[in-house]
Image: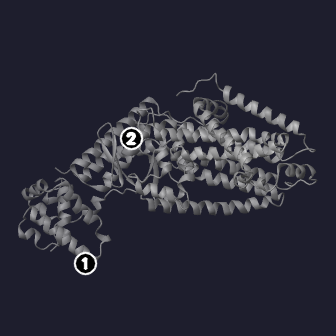
Amino acid sequence: MIIDLAKFIAAGQPFWTELDAFLKRLEDDPYRSLPFDQARRFHYLYERTAADLAKLNTFANEPETRGYLESLVARAYGEIHETREKPHRFQPVHWFMVVFPQTFRRHINVFWLTVAITLAGCAFGGFATILDPESRHVTMPFGHDRMTPSERVAREEKSTHDRLAGERASFSAYLMTHNTKVSIFTMALGMTWGIGTIIMLFYNGVVLGAISVDYIADGQAKFLAGWLLPHGSFEIPAILIAGQAGLILGRALIGRGTRKNLTERLREISTDLVTLIGGVGVLLIWAGLVESFFSQYHEPVLPYSVKIAFGLVELTGLTLFLWKSGSKLRLPQ
Amino acid sequence: MNNVRASTLTIRTPEGVVFALRLASPFTRFLACALDFACVSAAMSIVGLAIGLLGLLSYDLSAAVYTLVFFTVQIGYGFFCEWLWRGQTIGKRLLRLRVVDAYGLRLQFSQIVIRNLLRFVDMLPAFYLIGGLAALINARTQRLGDLAANTVVIQSPQFEQPDLEQMLAGKFNSLRTHPQLEARLRQRISPVEASLALQAILRRDEFEPRARAELFARLGEHFRALVEFPPESVEHITDEQYLRNVIDTVYRSRKTDTQSQPKPAH
């Protein structure tokens, strides 16, 4: 039997058009929810169109109408069978103050792993600097290998002109965007089953350890603390959180200790990854501003004790924020 | 729930209905990406001129704003467009591509963000080499970002319903003068054969004249062999007209009897 196509189209067209209109309304406003009677009607239209498609597939092989009905059924299927929570209107303050720290705490074990990897890198870089001074040419980027810490401190403290004068805002913007790119890259490397993320974290640790040991061995620990703490108290945790996101991604890909399939594992973590990397972006905006407008000033312009105190206050504040913020509110899992 | 066959993603709903989404090829996706790149470059050239005016006040401020705006557009273009247009950017719109959830469900914002952020790895070492290779190897042509976000890129062609009324109206169908043979034809013809005849008629203007004549000759021969009509009904009509008559017989019910049909021209 072959259906009377013209009659079939004429009979189904009003329902298909109505379903299409429903879908357009839902697609135009992702936050829209339907009242009960409209939801029933929408479901009826979906089932009717699905039945039409089944009938067409069985009794006529007409690709144009079938393609049209398939696209309608596919769109309606996505709306009806979606069981994940509907998107809420984005509330930036709530998201940053509650969702971000809660997400961070939910994966705290992974964060400790990133800390351990970075500390291992620090130890490697530090030992390399002590045992093989020539390694500084490899482990110290941004020209730090070209002069000793004492020479740099002397140059900075004697400098009479502001070397960032007229470039401070653009330098700040550069730092924000560069560090955010590095963070995103660190997270994205989680797709290498976390290996790329581990290498990035370890390498960051090597650089940090090598430079720190170099300054400490040269008796410039105070300068180092005053230089790194104000922006590093945000920047380093931000990179660690990006690494946390990367390792969460890697763990989901490996899937050890769970019976869920890959798709389910990735689906479970997707919102957390976005939250973590979004939080990292916010932290890096602050770090960029501080690095450009505060960290680059040294004694005698700005006492090191002030810079160190400022950095310690930031670090304490960030720690309290990540550990406590939003802890009294419970989010739906 | 769903399975993959060559270049399509087939989804079976709990109601038992099956529908197929046609997957976009890596090459088409690369073209869409190139179009998006051109759009971002063009937008930044225009925005850059406006930001350049800020340089009259402060060069530093102008450079900072440009850096931030460029970064935001570069990163945010994909998020913004795909969220606003339900899985489409300008390049994808032009090539009729769309990002959808791999299970056919509603696309979530987090999926859009992840697939766009993971471009950083897909782009490595240059020209989306890693992403392109991943898409070529993957059965659903997913790059790494799609794998992580559980999305696929499909082709969403525009659907036009066949205008049967216009195609068949006003034409005399000589087969209708033999209702019994018509009924036999309806019984013997399969949906695939009927669809083949319909598509040949609908797309007849797309063929070269010679190929068109050969195609309709072969189809005519095939359909004439299914049911033998009396010579006076079929011998003076072309293969193409014969096929029209077959379609008219198969796809339209006998609401019009032979008396209400247009009279044959003499």
Identity of the residue drawn at 85% across and 56% down: A166
Q: Nearer the viewer, residue B38 or A275?
A: A275
Q: Position of residue A162 (x, y in %)?
A: 89, 53
Identity of the residue drawn at 39% across and 35% down: A41
Mark 1, Cα crowd under 10 Å, few <14 / some 14-19 / many 20+, is few
Q: Residue furthest front?
A: A131
Mark 2, Cα crowd under 10 Å, few <14 / some 14-19 / many 20+, is many
| Disc 1 + disc 2, Cβ < 8 Å | no
Task: Tell me the subunit letter for badge 2.
Answer: A
The kind of residue on which mark 2 rests is: Tyr
Whether labels 1 and 2 share one chain: no
The residue that mark 1 highlights is: B210
B185 relative position to B107: left or right = left
Between marks 1 and 2, how big is the CA–CA gap? 45 Å
Q: Position of residue B221 (x, y in %)?
A: 13, 69
Q: Residue furthest bottom?
A: B210
Give the mark count: 2
Q: Quadrant of the C terminus of chain B?
A: bottom left
Task: Tell me the subunit letter for badge 1.
Answer: B
Q: Which quarter of the picture shows residue B163?
A: bottom left
Q: Position of residue B209 (x, y in %)?
A: 27, 77
Q: Nearer the viewer, residue A262 or A308?
A: A308
Q: Is residue B236 above or below residue A289?
A: below
Q: Quadrant of the N terminus of chain B?
A: top left
The kind of residue on which mark 1 rests is: Arg
Q: Position of residue A94 (x, y in %)?
A: 65, 31
The residue that mark 2 highlights is: A77
Q: Which quarter of the picture shows residue A306?
A: top right
